[in-house]
Amino acid sequence: MPRQTQQRAAIDRAFAQAQRPLSPAEVLAAATGEVPNLNLSTVYRTLRRMQEEGVIAPVSVPGEPPRYELAHVAEHHHHHFHCRRCGRVFDLSGCPTGLSKLLPRGFVLESHTLVLHGLCGQCA
């Protein structure tokens, strides 16, 4: 069982409260309210440990640094929306159908990842 430090507890709460994928900088900003002396290197170390423990999973947005989301969210197929203005990433429910129709003849679709880009409700 992982050691539950004040820093780890604050980072866990940051993910629980955000309910969306977070960058290391967003984790730091959310957690420093509880732990003012928290620094980015501690956040990175903790995120790496949380990923090794299977608590969080990386979210890939092309051209962007990785974000992380809770593993129980990542287990369920979903997609993401990336706001080009504020940089935040949000989970999307639902999945487009008919993707196999886009494939060249003889190709077999095994999986897909979809990231929509635009402006979030706050930035629009």
Image (spheres, helix red, strand yellow):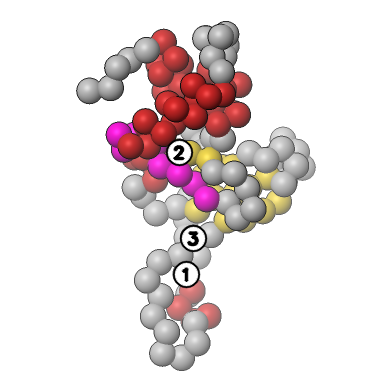
Mark pair 1, 2: CA separation: 24 Å
Q: Look at label 3 and name its amino acid.
A: Thr
Q: Is 25 left, or right, of 68 in this rendering?
A: right
Q: Which residues are magenta?
A: 53-60
Q: Is 88 left, or right, of 97 in this rendering?
A: right
Q: Which is nearer the N-term, disc 3 or disc 1?
A: 1
Regarding mark 3 in the picture, which secondary structure is present there?
loop
Q: Nearer the viewer, mark 1 or mark 2?
A: 2
Tell me residue 115's x, y (percent): 57, 56
* Residue 109 visible here: yes
What residue is pinned by disc 3?
Answer: 113
Judge by depth and name the residue closer to the eye, 35 or 41.
Answer: 41
At 63% from the left and 39% from the top, the residue drawn is 88
Mark pair 3, 2: CA separation: 15 Å
What residue is pinned by disc 1?
Answer: 97
Regarding mark 2 in the picture, which secondary structure is present there?
strand
Residue 115 drawn above or below residue 96: above
At 55% from the left and 31% from the top, the residue drawn is 24
Tell me residue 69's x, y (percent): 45, 38
In the picture, the quarter occupied by the C terminus is top right
Regarding mark 1 in the picture, which secondary structure is present there?
loop
Q: Is 88 left, or right, of 21 in this rendering?
A: right
Crowdedness near tag 1: few (<14), some (14–19) or many (≥20) residues, C-alpha within 10 Å? few
Magenta span includes 95: no
- Residue found at the very far left of the displayed protein: 1
The label on residue 69 is: 2
